[in-house]
Image: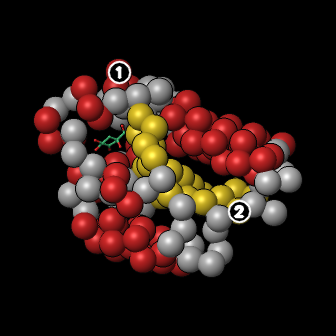
Amino acid sequence: MTKILVLNGPNLNLLGTREPEIYGRLTLDDINERMRLRAEAAGASIAFAQSNHEGALVDAIQAARGKADYIILNAAAFTHYSIAIRDAIAAAGVPVIEVHLSNIHRREEFRHTSVIAPVVQGQICGFGAESYMAALAVIICRMEEHQ
Ligand code: DQA
C-alpha cells in the first residue's frame, strides 16, 4: 500500500483565519480531511503532521525515510531559506512534492525563491487547497500506473 505523509510548516495551523484573502477560508483540518477521503478511496494510507519548528520538520522528514513513499510538503516560510530542510529532503531520499496555497512567484520578491525546489520532484502552487489535491492526484496517477 502506498504511504503518503503530508507535512505542513509554520503558521499553517492558523489556516482559516490567517490572511484568508491569500490562503482561503478552509482550515488545515478541512484540507487534511479532503485529502484523507481521496487517498483512502484510492487505497493509499495517509498521515498528517504540522509544526512551527524547523527542527521538528527535519525530524519528520528523516523519520519518513523507509516509511513513506511520498511526502507532500508545504514548508511555508522555511521554503525560502531553510537549508536544513533542503538537506533533510536530499538525505531522506523520499520523493517530495512541494505545495503552496498561494502562487509564490507572483507575491513578494523574497517568496520567489524556493531553496527546496532543486531537491523535490516538482512544485504545485497557486491553487489554494487544490494545490494539495493536485499533488495527491499525481501520486494516485502513479499508483494506478504501477498496478
Ligand atoms: C505558503 C507561502 C509562503 O511564502 C508562506 O510563508 C506561507 C505559506 C503558501 O502555502 O502559500 O506560510 O507556503
- Residue that numbered label 2 is attached to: 3
Q: Earlier in the sequence, mark 1 or mark 2?
A: 2
Residue at (51% x, 34% y) in the render: 131
Nearest to viewer (mark 1 / mark 2): 2
**Quadrant housing residue 33:** top right
Quadrant containing the N terminus is bottom right
Classed neighbour count for the residue bearing mark 2: other residues with Cα under 10 Å, few (<14), some (14–19), many (≥20): some
**Helix, strand or loop for disc 2:** strand
In this picture, is 16 found above or below 85? above
Q: Amino acid at mark 2?
A: Lys
Classed neighbour count for the residue bearing mark 1: other residues with Cα under 10 Å, few (<14), some (14–19), many (≥20): few
**Residue 28 in sight:** yes
**Helix, strand or loop for disc 1:** helix
Residue 99: give x, y in percent of width and height: 45, 43
Q: Which of the numbered marks, if any, corresponds to residue 58?
A: none
- Residue sitting at the far front: 145
Residue 92: give x, y in percent of width and height: 48, 75
- Residue sitting at the far top: 21
Residue at (46% x, 38% y) in the render: 124
- Residue that numbered label 1 is attached to: 21
Q: Is residue 135 left or right of residue 126?
A: right
Residue at (33% x, 65% y) in the render: 86
Residue 146: give x, y in percent of width and height: 79, 54
**Ligand 1 quadrant in view:** top left
Q: Amino acid at mark 1?
A: Glu
**Residue 31 in sight:** no
In this picture, is 65 found above or below 78? below
